[in-house]
Amino acid sequence: MKIAFWSEESNAGTTFNLAVTACAAVFMHPISLAVVSGGYHDEKLEKKFFRTVGGLPTRAGVGAAYDQRFVFAAEEQEFFLTRGVEYLLQKEQREDLTEMAVKSNMRQIVRNRMYFLPSSPKSEQEWWHQDSLFVRMDRIMDALESYFDVVFVDCGSRRDDYAQKIVREADVCVWNMDQESQNIGAYYQSSTRFQGEIFFLLANYFADALYNRENLQRVYRMEESRLGAIPYNPRLQAESRMGRTHKGVKRCIDQGETGSDAEFTRELARSTNLILKLAGVIR
């Protein structure tokens, strides 16, 4: 099961929206989940969960560096000066992408439940001429879907061939937009064809704004179950910049609708559940 997050706008909060909904999904439901960047060299998603000190990634809230950068153990207990997708792309056959090989090249966000696949440290222009890359990326995505209940892919506002392929073929495409952009109309005028379901997600949402969920549903005659919102939350935004997104979301979920983040938690839970239901992950 693959859920792609994408936007036509660069300021739609796509990566943040994916990070918080993925965390909410794991904390609210007994599922396993992988989060993946939709580009080969893109650390934006990783920085939502892991902070860096002196250029080295660390576990959020832990002073010591997270192992060694670019060093991951393979299933044979050997070490390679590669990591994440960089190492997995070297596998010649789909059969080589065992669960142990894949998960040992990922980073745990929530123990045994939620993992992140690091992107390549190489610049993207070094990859485009390798046609076989697309085939191998498909194998990696296939492996991830077989080892996890659901895979969230952050395609940002990318328009390259690979990101657009992910968006078109995903089981659900979460179309992110700024609340005031009225970009829902652009979807109905678009020639883009999607294989899966479409869900619209409003970023930095304010319920008292003119274009709130209820008004947008009425204007575009949308089903209530197709439109969600992630309210503006400065505290969680700050935690996200520090690589502590999962800790901030867990605090919100644990507090429920009785804490200071009640409105945020209510909308986050609603949007997350609607996305998972649309994907068939939950009923």
Image (spheres, rainbow, N blue to C red):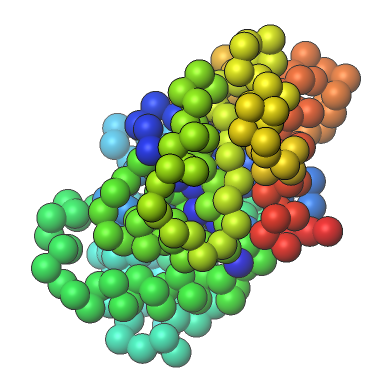
Pick the front one: 279 or 253: 279
The correct choice, above or below, for 95 with respect to 173 in the image is below
Pick the front one: 265 or 220: 220
Query: To which quarter of the image does residue 45 belong?
Result: top left
Q: Position of residue 49 (x, y in %)?
A: 51, 39
Pick the front one: 5 or 46: 5
Q: Is residue 27 left or right of residue 10?
A: right
Q: Residue furthest right?
A: 258
- Residue at 31% x, 61% y is 162
Q: Is residue 104 left or right of residue 221?
A: left
Q: Is residue 20 visible?
A: no
Q: Is residue 175 visible?
A: yes
- Residue at 61% x, 18% y is 211
Q: Position of residue 99 (x, y in %)?
A: 54, 77
Q: Quadrant of the C terminus?
A: bottom right
- Residue at 62% x, 12% y is 210
Query: To which quarter of the image does residue 73 belong?
Result: bottom left
Q: Quadrant of the N terminus?
A: bottom right
Q: Is residue 205 left or right of residue 12?
A: right
